[in-house]
Image: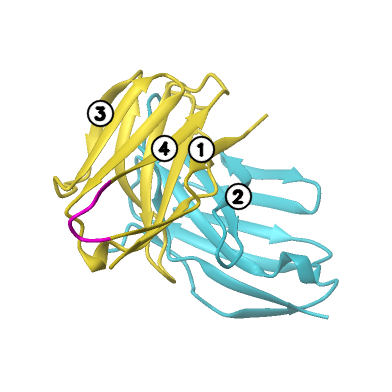
Amino acid sequence: DTEVTQTPKHLVMGMTNKKSLKCEQHMGHRAMYWYKQKAKKPPELMFVYSYEKLSINESVPSRFSPECPNSSLLNLHLHALQPEDSALYLCASSQSGGMNTEAFFGQGTRLTVV
Amino acid sequence: QKEVEQNSGPLSVPEGAIASLNCTYSDRGSQSFFWYRQYSGKSPELIMFIYSNGDKEDGRFTAQLNKASQYVSLLIRDSQPSDSATYLCAVNKSGGGADGLTFGKGTHLIIQP
């Protein structure tokens, strides 16, 4: 089973709204990631959690707030977003440590900020 | 200097032929190399990964790695129309931890029936 589940699949939110994206995996992976992908661009790394601790923040604006409640769950809290934040948000997971760092992606949440 | 470079294409290949996709990377410390396939509007799907110099084969796919030349390639044999997609090359710097992936811009592959 290489499934990473993201909810919701689609989200439309206003610039004053607060919303959350959710990600879940049951592969026993201890590293989880958030990526942002704009149209016709490659995914760009936002955050990395390793063993439930934030290990990498790629200088992401504070209107994006990640959370890792446990080893299977990853959230991305959104507040006061801008229209340019509209994108496909991808969650991924991998083993942490050693050479087996293959990352498996969820289906993504397509976010539109209006 | 871009970290991972790919020709964006489109690369057009006749059905049944071999598609050859190439990628170069700038960081000599990179340890792990991945090929993802992404259909329009979908998320990236892992096809192959390679860590050691040489070739690695999986079905119709062969990944090739040359660390001295900082070059990774993906060969797709007996190309099918369903192989038409964007192929993303990704690099992980770490050999022992989770650093996330750096992606190339992707090569748009079109298999002509």
Q: Mark 2: which secondary structure? A: strand
- Find the distance from the CA under tag 1 to the CA under tag 4: 17 Å
Residue, x 50% and y 56% (percent of image)?
A: B89
Q: Identify the mark at residue B27; answer none if there is no mark.
A: none
In the image, are marks 3 and 1 on the same chain? Answer: yes
Residue, x 50% and y 51% (percent of image)?
A: A9
Q: Mark 4: which secondary structure? A: strand
In the image, are marks 1 and 2 on the same chain? Answer: no
Amino acid carrying mark 3 in the image: Ser
Which residue matches tag 3?
A: A55
Amino acid carrying mark 4 in the image: Lys
In the image, are marks 4 and 3 on the same chain? Answer: yes
Residue, x 38% and y 37% (percent of image)?
A: A33
Q: Is label 1 or label 4 in front?
A: 4
Q: Position of residue A108 (x, y in %)?
A: 48, 50
Q: Identify the mark at residue A22; answer none if there is no mark.
A: 4
Q: Nearer the viewer, residue A68 or A51?
A: A68
Host chain of mark 2:
B
Magenta residues (range):
A14-18
* Location of residue B96 with respect to A66 vertically, above or below: above
Residue A50 among those drawn in magenta: no
Q: Position of residue B35 (x, y in %)?
A: 57, 51
Host chain of mark 3:
A
- Find the distance from the CA under tag 4 to the CA under tag 3: 19 Å
Host chain of mark 1:
A
Q: Mark 1: which secondary structure? A: loop
In the image, are marks 1 and 4 on the same chain? Answer: yes
